[in-house]
Amino acid sequence: MTWVELPPDTGFGIDNLPLGVFSTADSGRRTGVRIGDAVLELVEITGDDVHRTGSLNEFMARGPVAWAALRADIRQWLTEEAHRDTVEKHLYRLDEVTLHLPVEVADYVDFYSSRQHAENVGRLFRPDAEPLPANWTHLPIGYHGRAGTVRVSGTPVVRPSGQRRAGDFGLSERLDLEAEVGFVVGVGSQLGTAVPAEALADHVFGICLVNDWSARDLQAWEYVPLGPFLGKSFLTSVSPWVVPLAALEAARVPPPTRDPRPLAYLDDAGRPWGLDVTLEVRLNGELISRPPFATQYWTAPQQLAHLTVNGASLRTGDLFASGTVSGPQREQWGSLLELSENGRQPLTIADGSTSTFLEDGDVVTVTASAPGPGDSRIGLGEVTGAVCAPGGSARPAGGRTVA
């Protein structure tokens, strides 16, 4: 039990302790840990300048022993009354800090790991063919995204332009959201050396929420035969808090049954890393979907093993995301492409209006939580973005965050 006063039903109790980067009006960017609705500044209490760098990268590169040691220290500081006088003066209210991108993103990979999402998309675009590509149940499909456009929650979503079809250039008319979970690499690997699935916790520090915004009209015209490019690269939003893998032990569940059985390097039998994370997607404040992450066909250890099996190296700050999370029920689908059936079936909003794809002024917020020890919950925070036209201004996105 912590001596910090916590809001009822907080997802940020002593069993969570996510790390992020914050600043205040009179001081620059440094590392903080969230506890309830407060942020504990680490550089002053630890005396370690690694927490003054404005990024989690240098700390994450120290590896699992250092991660565990800091986590144990923080738990002690926040639970033992003897530390209260020293620690309390380094606590800031969440509403008096500005949150920043928590990591300097090195490389970004986006996977396509929800079978339900892949089948939904296949039925929409290939109604007379098998919904899944022939290789889908054999390997985790993914693509390399643009690390330089990964930005923190609250960054305005400027509607992109591009080729929408032959001879037609203009603003995207089918701007979409994608509710995802991201995994942040702390420890790199050597070029030419594959990382085995069982080594996930040796390399991955924690998870965050991701919204991989998508221009569906640009994407549909350009992706054959090479895959996503401009329809995806204009912006990927991430939540400001990175939840350590160590906080998610109670959320681990067996993944779905795989058929055929994965090849040896993808075999995760006996090492379940399915995660019982429930996402919630809100459009202008209204709940429109609750995607369940536990249904993901391919898990993070398999994704990590696959993206390095050819010898590709990991770097500190690498981000790999799950791809759109969708469950078997319509109210569990994680994109407007699915929810509106590619624009053919508009969503009806509570005020009576309808929506297919995103309009200027729309605000999308994705939140998530997972089971913690006992009856506790582990919060993943939120990733939010407001859509605006080029040169326009987005209306407030619900939090003081900056790129």
Image (spheres, rainbow, N blue to C red):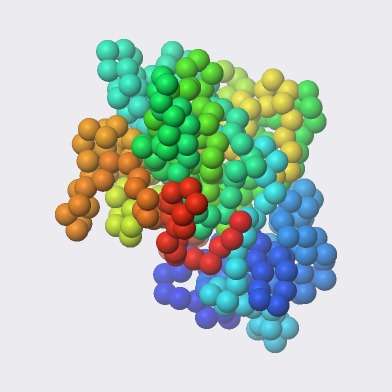
Where is residue 304 drawn, in percent x and y?
A: 62, 32
Specify the quadrant of the image occupied by residue 196: top right
Left or right of 22 in this view: 268? left
Left or right of 174 in this view: 153? right
Question: Foreground: 126 or 130?
Answer: 126
Can I make out residue 297 in this image?
A: no
Point 65% across, 42% down: residue: 148
Question: Foreground: 286 or 254?
Answer: 286
Point 36% across, 37% down: residue: 173
Tally the marks: 0
Which image quarter holds the C terminus? bottom right
Point 20% across, 52% down: residue: 353
Where is residue 217 drawn, in percent x and y?
A: 39, 30
Which image quarter holds the N terminus? bottom right
Q: Is residue 368 above or below residue 85?
A: above
Q: Residue furthest left?
A: 352
Left or right of 307 in this view: 383? left
Can I make out residue 49 in this image?
A: yes
Q: Is residue 333 above or below residue 243?
A: above
Q: Residue furthest bottom?
A: 85
Left or right of 187 in this view: 262? left
Point 31% across, 12% down: residue: 129
Question: Foreground: 223 or 46?
Answer: 223
Where is residue 26 drawn, in percent x and y?
A: 70, 77
Q: Is residue 317 above or below residue 382?
A: above
Where is residue 206 drawn, in percent x and y?
A: 61, 49
Question: Foreground: 78 or 115?
Answer: 115
Specify the quadrant of the image occupied by residue 123: top left
